[in-house]
Image: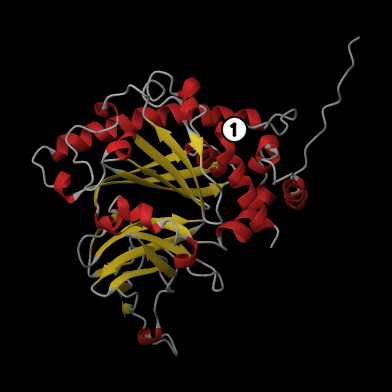
Amino acid sequence: MHTEQKIECRFDDGETIARRILAQQSDNALRAETLPAEAYNSDEFYRIEEQKVLREDWLFVGHMGQLPKENDFFTLDMIGEPLLIVRKAEGVRVMSNVCLHRWVPIASGSGNAQVFVCPFHNWSYDTEGKLTGAPSMQQAEGFDRHNCQLPQIRHEIVAGMIFVTFSATIGSLSERFGDLLPVLNKYHLAELECAFTLDYDCPFNWKMAVETFIECYHHAGVHRTTLEDSFPGRLTWIGEDTPGWTVCHQPLRKRGELSEILTEGLVPFGGLEGEDLRHSDLYLLYPTCLMSLNPDRVTLNVILPMSKSMSQWHRVVLVSKEAAAREDFPATVDRMRSGVMTIVAEDLEINAEQQRGSRSQLARPGRLSHLETSVWHLANYLKRKLAV
């Protein structure tokens, strides 16, 4: 007998969505399920995430390999905050990229500069963020450019990775990543050079981008003609959850050749041998840093949330100094970039469809495979942050 089902109308109630997430079980991976679909489609819940998750944690912004020389800089917008990151002789400055006059960003892209000039009214700043020039301000009573400086952002550097936080109370990263440092040092992360960066828009919620990166269960469906042959999803396994990260171990197929994991033109990192050369580990450093450790390259990614259904992906690909010095390195970079974009296109298509499907009034939390335990780990991290 057919029974009609009433389709309930959803409401954009961020607090209700947060309570539903907190009510989900978090102590048995065998009963793991996804977050509610509303968590990917609510303006109100996105604002809660901005305040309780993103602004109250450490966020990856880039690597020192992007700043090889003094006065090198790059810019990046993080949860609505335009940032300017500059290399100085004594280290790195991270500061607001917003002019103190009428709020236009003073720099864009990347490069090398000793002075940053706002394109609106030519106010100028040095590489420490001090206002050095403000034309035609002599009649502004009480104005003194010497007392003006761009706000400085709290930051820390771990194994060459630059992290920022908007929190004044969160603890140091040295405590969180202490057990991870031996792994990062094994790949010489602090010494690597930037091969190239890549930025592209993701028309879906930031959590969808993160979740897809940290599980290989989708290889057989989404990457069946690209990644699945060499890195079958069924062979992957998820490490134990920690307060700071989760990891998906991605081994090369049992009879796979090293040529399937190594990149022509690159040099494997010194000290790696045997099984170290036969796997690629995928890390999520909570909440938005995605890291791929390969025997001859490291990829660092940050997902930049922009709204409930739009994110930007910033990718930094790092290689050894020996590889970067080779004459054929430009050709190697072209091949790497092309290969990356093939995989990116496959993920972008499926995640855009996932976002579309998640808007359905009939979408409910789905059960997770043991190959997706890292997705459950992210959900438990969110619970810890929402509960504070």
Question: Splitting the image into 4 quarters, where does residue 384 fall?
Answer: bottom right
Q: Which residue is mark 1?
A: 370
Which of these two is toward me, 105 or 332?
332
Q: Going 40% across and 27% down the picture, which residue do you hit?
A: 231
Q: Going 26% across and 44% down the picture, which residue do you hit?
A: 272
Badge 1 element:
helix
- Eyeballing the image, is 291 above or below 5? below
Disc 1 residue type? His
- Eyeballing the image, is 220 above or below 2? below
- Eyeballing the image, is 370 above or below 180? above
Query: Does any portion of residue 105 appear in the rendered image?
Result: no
Left/right placement of residue 9 relative to residue 134 reads right
Query: Does any portion of residue 27 appear in the rendered image?
Result: yes
Q: Going 18% across and 41% down the picture, which residue do you hit?
A: 267
The quadrant in which the C terminus is found is bottom right
Left/right placement of residue 109 relative to residue 102 reads left
Left/right placement of residue 336 relative to residue 311 reads left
The picture places residue 275, in percent across and down from the top left corner, at 32, 37
Question: Among all residues in the image, which is located at the extreme bottom?
Answer: 142
